[in-house]
Each structure stands twice: as structure tokens, then as C-alpha cells.
Image: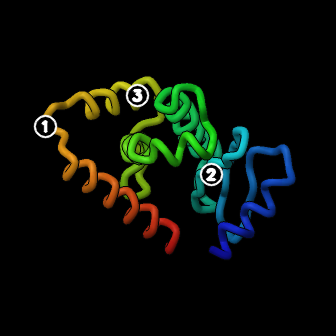
Amino acid sequence: MAFEKNVFSKTSRTDSEIAFFGGMTIVYKSSIDLFLYVVGSSHENELMLMSVLTCLFESLNHVLRKNVEKRWLLENMDGAFLVLDEIVDGGVILESDPQQVIQKVNFRADDSSLTEQSVAQVLQSAKEQIKWSLLK
């Protein structure tokens, strides 16, 4: 949590969209009461990280019906994890086009074979990937 607190304290007071902290490149965007961050190594291309952040924000904007704020995100966490799962897998960028992500998420949500168990597996996988990416 110390890394997250330090990043938040550094980025919450500025209007810029990029920061360098602890050997990491961080791009971020705020919306109402929510900060979204994409973190990469210092060698990552900032434009690519920004395209991932833009894709994440626009996809969440669609999934949350233009209510990108903490309360709506917490109530729709399963959809947010599906969006994240379509954009990044194990630190590898899979998609940066929000329309493609939205289409894939809608397809997965409409798929009749999608059961509660498979949603739980997707959520667990996303949580594990986030945990491991933060520990690296």
C-alpha cells in the first residue's frame, strides 16, 4: 500500500497526466472521485501506456453508462474486471481500441454459456494478475 499512497499523493495535486516514480512510468486520469492509473517500467513508451489508459477509461465509460465514479465502479466491479481482462493479460497489452473491448465484453456478457463460475474465474484471474503486477 505504500507505493499506492505515494503515487496518489504525488499525482492527486497536479494537472499533468504522467509521472515518474520509483523507476516506474505512471500515466493517470481522474474522473469525479476516481483516479485511474496505468503503470509501466521506466522503459515503456508513454504513448502506449496512455493509449491503454484511454482505452480503459472509454471502455469503463461505456460499461458504467457514462458514470465513471467510485460508487458505480464498485457496484459494477465484474464489468470493470472484464474490461481490464480484455485490455491487458499478464502485463501484455492485448487491445487498445475501446470499441473492440466493448464489443468483446458485450459478447462475453451475452454468451449464454457464461456462468457464475466462469465469471468468478475471470475475476480471480484478474485479481491475481493485478496482485502480481503490483508485486513486481
Q: Residue at x 64, y 46 (%)?
A: 46
Which structural element holds mark 3?
helix
Q: Earlier in the sequence, mark 2 or mark 3?
A: 2
Which structural element holds mark 1?
loop
Residue under circle 1?
113
Of residues 133 and 44, the one nearer the viewer is 133
Query: In the shown orientation, is residue 97 left or right of residue 6?
Result: left
Three-letter residue code for mark 1: Ser
Of residues 100 and 41, the one nearer the viewer is 100
Looking at this rendering, what residue extends furthest in the left direction? Answer: 113
Three-letter residue code for mark 2: Tyr
Which structural element holds mark 2?
strand
Q: Earlier in the sequence, mark 3 or mark 1?
A: 3
Residue under circle 3?
102
Of residues 89 and 81, the one nearer the viewer is 81
Q: Residue at x 67, y 76 (%)?
A: 2
The vertical placement of 10 against 55, above or below, is below
Residue under circle 2?
37
